Amino acid sequence: MTPEHERLLSLRRRARLSILKRRSVAGVCVGVIVAASLAGQWTGDIPSSYWLLLTLIAAAGAAIARAEPARTRSISLNLFAIALTVRVLWLMAATAVARHAGGPFLGPDSASYWEGALDLASQHLRLGVPPTAYYGSYNVGQYYLFAAVVALFGPYLVCLQMLNAGLTALAAPVAYAVARLTVPRGARAIGLFIALSPSLTALAAVDLLKDPSIIFATLLALFAILRLMRERSARRLVVPALVALAAFLYLRTARFYALAYIEAATCVAVALCVLLSGRIGARRRAGLAVLALVFVAAELIPIPAGWPTTPVVFASQVGYVMDSPGMRFYSAGFLRRFRHWKYTELDEVVEGPAGAAADVARRLLGPFPWILPQRWNLRTLQAGDYFLYPGMLLWYAILPFVAIGFAIGGRATFQRTGRRSIGLSVLWLFTAAYVLQYFVINLSYRQRESIVPLLLVFGWWGIVYAWQRPGLTRWYGAYWAFLTCLAIAHLSLRAMIRA
């Protein structure tokens, strides 16, 4: 054996011993989770029913890992274990701090979900009237999800927060599975990013939001679509179809426009494949046929409960949003407040292109981590998106690569080629629609975090592209220099106005 062969063999052995493949990782994580949970129960913050919920979440993680090929099961399981450990530690700490600070402190949406779940559970999940009429919204799936947890595990807020923590932990192996089918070389990095994401952890472990369940359902839906497009055997299409149906039904009743974008992206991707490639391969036809049946079932099943079809709901809500000032217009930002300080001649510029550019910058770069909170207590930190600050630094780090990869994905989607990836086209079109909505109407920063797992797929393309072009390194340095100057200028002007 030559020295070169020995070196290659050594590298392969090291790869097999990578940390995400070691069985000991999951064991250590289980020990940490149990210890942290016992400490929480000892202080009186954790009910006994919490352990059953934790066990069910762990079983779901094991089931997702079991669905992976044998060679990647340990990676999937370890990603889930790492993600769950981080979130349980956050949850235990946040629960203890909230109790000592006089909490818990719930935002307006979270308070409505908590009260709605208690009310629905008290009625045994039967309202007697159509849910859309009772809640005045087509997004009510989260009430039933939370009410089911209350009915099974008791009226404990920490159990609902544990559910959210578990769902974002489950998102890590599902994101890994999506990446493995699209950008295999970057799958581990993407899964680990989601597992350790400070923003996703904070969204799950603090407050009571529906975003964790939406993120998980969206990733699950897109993963099922990718699997349906790859399987040939009718028997192997059954499980992805059932998973897709469950995810579609939840999105249809909890965040309808997510399903609308998935449906539209799938239809456009198939149409582009036919128009640009001239045909659809035989391998994909069976999966696409099953997927079409799943879409029809997801549309028909909720109709008796009072839900119109998704296109009808989407069209009606577009009109509502366009007539709602709170959704059409952003609150007065720094640039708009700046004109009232001294330079009144800038009124037309600020209200025109500069104002629009400032709004886009806020949506892209906010919340600004260089603006420190006025008070360092839990209520202030929770209400002001300050828990997103650590994640913003990671977002800034990947943003240039996301932009490059997204451009590459857009070109591939509309490029004429003999072998097209319908799945990647679906991902790109869905992400494009979601991102466009985020910039067009006034949504919370949580909406951007919901789409980050998919943006990471395109970010990996951008990293590979930049890695092959060393000259881009200096542009990346210039990008961070720009952010530094922006922070300094922003803080300086804020100080001038306050002086």
Image (tube, rainbow, N blue to C red):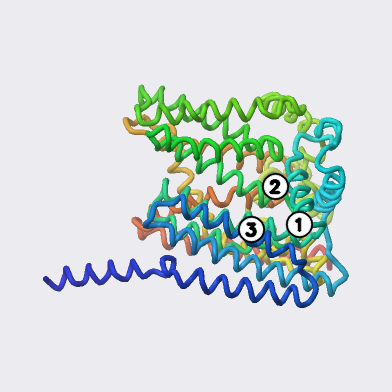
Dot 3 amino acid type: Gly
Residue that carries the numbered disc 3 in the rendered image: 166
Q: Position of residue 79 (x, y in %)?
A: 51, 62
In-front residue for pair 432/296: 296
Dot 1 amino acid type: Phe
Q: Which mark is residue 359?
A: 2
Label 3's element?
Answer: helix
**Circle 3 Cα neighbour tier, 10 Å, few/some/many (<14 / 14–19 / ≥20):** many
Q: Position of residue 200 (x, y in %)?
A: 63, 58
Residue positioned 32% across, 30% down in the render = 418
Q: Is residue 250 left or right of residue 470?
A: right
**Circle 1 Cα neighbour tier, 10 Å, few/some/many (<14 / 14–19 / ≥20):** some
The image shows residue 348, relative to residue 92, as above or below, that is above
Q: Earlier in the sequence, mark 2 or mark 3?
A: 3
The image shows residue 327, relative to residue 482, as above or below, that is above
The image shows residue 69, relative to residue 419, as above or below, that is below
Residue that carries the numbered disc 1 in the rendered image: 153
Q: CA distance from mark 2 to mark 3?
A: 34 Å
Q: Is residue 177 left or right of residue 12?
A: right
Task: Tell me whether the residue at label 1 lies in contact with that at label 2, contact meaning CB atoms closer than 8 angstroms.
Answer: no
Q: Is residue 127 left or right of residue 480?
A: right
